[in-house]
Image (cartoon, rainbow, N blue to C red):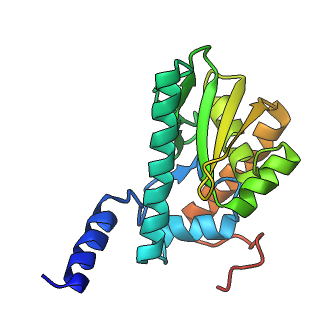
Amino acid sequence: MDPTTFQKQIDDHLIEHSRLDAKRDYLGMSAIGKCPRQVVREYLHGKTDLSLHSHQMAYAGYLFEDDVMNRLVEMGTARRNQVEVIAPFDSRLKGHVDGETVWGDLLEIKSLKVAKFEKVKSSHLSLMDHFAQVQLYMKYGSWKTTWIVYVCRETLEHNVIKVNYLHTQAIKYELKAQRMLAHIDSGMLPECECRYCRD
């Protein structure tokens, strides 16, 4: 066997096990904080970037998440309770939580590259995408507090952010999700909010 063939076997196996969804049949609560045009486009047509790099980033994300969760369980701090949270008004809006603390709060694990990790560390705030995600989890679940454990992919440094449920914020993101679903039903893309969409 030559090195190129060997490496291709490794890459092919990673792609097969990356858990990167090419197209979902639901609107993930983890996407509500993102640009609505991008999210609706991916719902209607699937992801446009299915490169090896995208699979590598997805695989790495789950790798870090699984590692942190395993250590938190071993520490006696967390339990795996990967329940599905579904919006009562439309079953297409749903999310899958990472777990819970042993005292009953929601637990989310996020891995970040160093630039975003330093932003979280210096601001003492979660990233907006993650804030929106957990606000909807808490609105439709039974939690009033979320602990987000951030881990830096380059340094393995950790940073813990506590997020409390804020009803007005949860309503804001619920309305945004409802607008996205309306665009999905109409087959029309909403306006871009990120300034990077080119369609």
Point 26% across, 65% down: residue = 13
Give left or right: position of 101 versus 147: left
Q: Position of residue 9 (x, y in %)?
A: 22, 73
Q: Is residue 93 above or below residue 37?
A: above
> In this view of the protein, which residue sits in the foreground, 15 or 119?
119
Q: Position of residue 59 (x, y in %)?
A: 43, 58
Point 67% across, 37% down: residue = 148
Q: Is residue 94 above or below residue 115?
A: above
List the single residue furthest toward the left. 1
Point 63% across, 70% down: residue = 38
Residue 50 visible within the image = no
Q: Position of residue 100 (x, y in %)?
A: 56, 25
Give left or right: position of 109 versus 194: left
Residue 170 visible within the image = yes
- Asked where in the image residue 117 lies, by quadrant, the reply is bottom right
> In this view of the protein, which residue sits in the foreground, 81 or 185?
81
Point 57% across, 33% down: residue = 88
Q: Is residue 79 above or below residue 30?
A: above
Question: The C terminus lies in which quarter of the figure?
Answer: bottom right
